[in-house]
Amino acid sequence: MLRRGTIRLRWLLPQGADAATMACWHALLEPAEQARAARFHREADRHAYIAAHALTRRMLSEAGGLAPTDWRFIEGAAGKPELAPTHGLPRLRFNLSHTRNLVACAVTCTDDVGLDVEDLERREAAEGIAERFFAPSEAAFIAALPREQRHEAFLRIWTLKEAFVKATGEGIAMGLDSFGFTLGRAPALAFAPESAGPVPAWRFLQLQPTPATILAVALRRAQAG
Ligand SMILES: CC(C)(COP(=O)(O)OP(=O)(O)OC[C@H]1O[C@@H](n2cnc3c(N)ncnc32)[C@H](O)[C@@H]1OP(=O)(O)O)[C@@H](O)C(=O)NCCC(=O)NCCS
């Protein structure tokens, strides 16, 4: 079992899996997940979904002792998946994220966790989105950077924001401008609404697992108890 305050984080590259590996991963999923997988039109998206859900089941098994096929899930508020209460493991928490190039899962004991991965080659109108949806301080930070650095800074903040809303479980309904980050040597939460708890309870991790992808993890320390 995981110790409190510990996080386990793993990722894998779904495009590296051969057909036999993919079939093994697919067999770990429950029928509802297999049905969802079948609805993806593009094979790369389907494989990423299967890889992410198989990775999650295997990581939960390492931490919680059941067989990978035995895990059942419920949807919390705003759709955040949690372990079914019937497992009797309320402290075991997890979150997952998938893109075609990378899938990842984080598992914690008690602490709320949110995880996001994105492809660095994603090419939105970064500044327009930042101005419209990010906190004004974040949009100003991006706009002040040399042009060639703006896109990466935008995606760094984007993944942090997404990890944050996934940790709270509230989704983007909480308003992406209601909380803000600073990007120094380590990313930090500058401000957040009261509903997100005290700012010092939050920790963030940002990595570039491959040259083409970026990952952010948000952890909210649970109250003692
Ligand atoms: C789930 C959500 C929070 C993130 O979705 P996403 O980035 O498209 O997808 P990810 O691969 O990172 O994560 C999906 C996984 O998160 C989990 N998830 C779903 N709802 C969640 C929620 N409310 N909170 C936390 N995790 C959630 C699920 O395991 C889901 O996997 P599945 O779809 O295979 O079952 C999405 O509902 C959302 O709000 N997207 C916002 C997109 C956006 O505009 N972001 C701007 C950020 S600046």
Image (tube, helix red, strand yellow):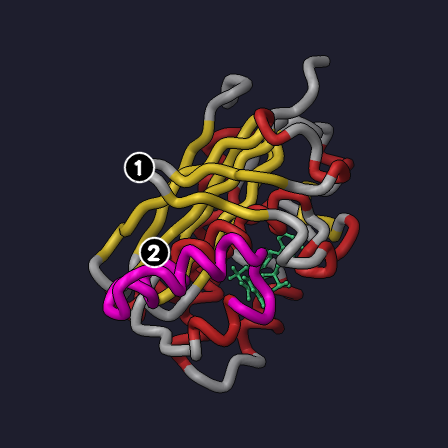
Query: Which secondary structure class fits the magenta region best?
Result: helix
Mark sitting on residue 222: none
Q: Is residue 143 left or right of residue 219?
A: left
Name which residue type carries label 2: Ile
Quarter of the figure with residue 24: bottom left
**Residue placed furthest toward the left:** 211
Circle 1 packing at 10 Å, graded few (<14), some (14-19), many (20+), is: few
Q: Residue 132: say if magenta.
A: yes
In the image, residue 199 sits, relative to residue 70, either above or below, namely above
**Viewer-proximal residue, 102 or 84?**
102
Q: In which quarter of the image is the C terminus?
A: top right
The reply to whether residue 22 is in sight is yes
Mark sitting on residue 185: 1
For mark 2, give the secondary structure. Answer: strand
In the image, residue 100 sits, relative to residue 142, either above or below, namely below
Quarter of the figure with residue 39: bottom right
Tag 2 residue: 214
Residue that appears at 46% across and 39% down: 59
**What range of the chain is rendered magenta?**
131-154
Residue that appears at 20% across and 59% down: 211
Q: In this view, does 85 lie to the left or right of 55?
A: right
In the image, residue 85 sits, relative to residue 151, either above or below, namely above
Name which residue type carries label 1: Arg
Could you say where residue 180 lies in the image, as x and y percent from the top left?
Answer: 56, 48
Could you say where residue 42 lies in the image, as x and y percent from the top left?
Answer: 44, 84
Measure how far apart labels 1 and 2 are at the Cα level. 16 Å
Could you say where residue 143 lies in the image, as x and y percent from the top left?
Answer: 40, 65
The reply to whether residue 24 is in sight is no
For mark 1, give the secondary structure. Answer: loop
**Viewer-proximal residue, 103 or 23?**
103
The quadrant where ligand 1 appears is bottom right
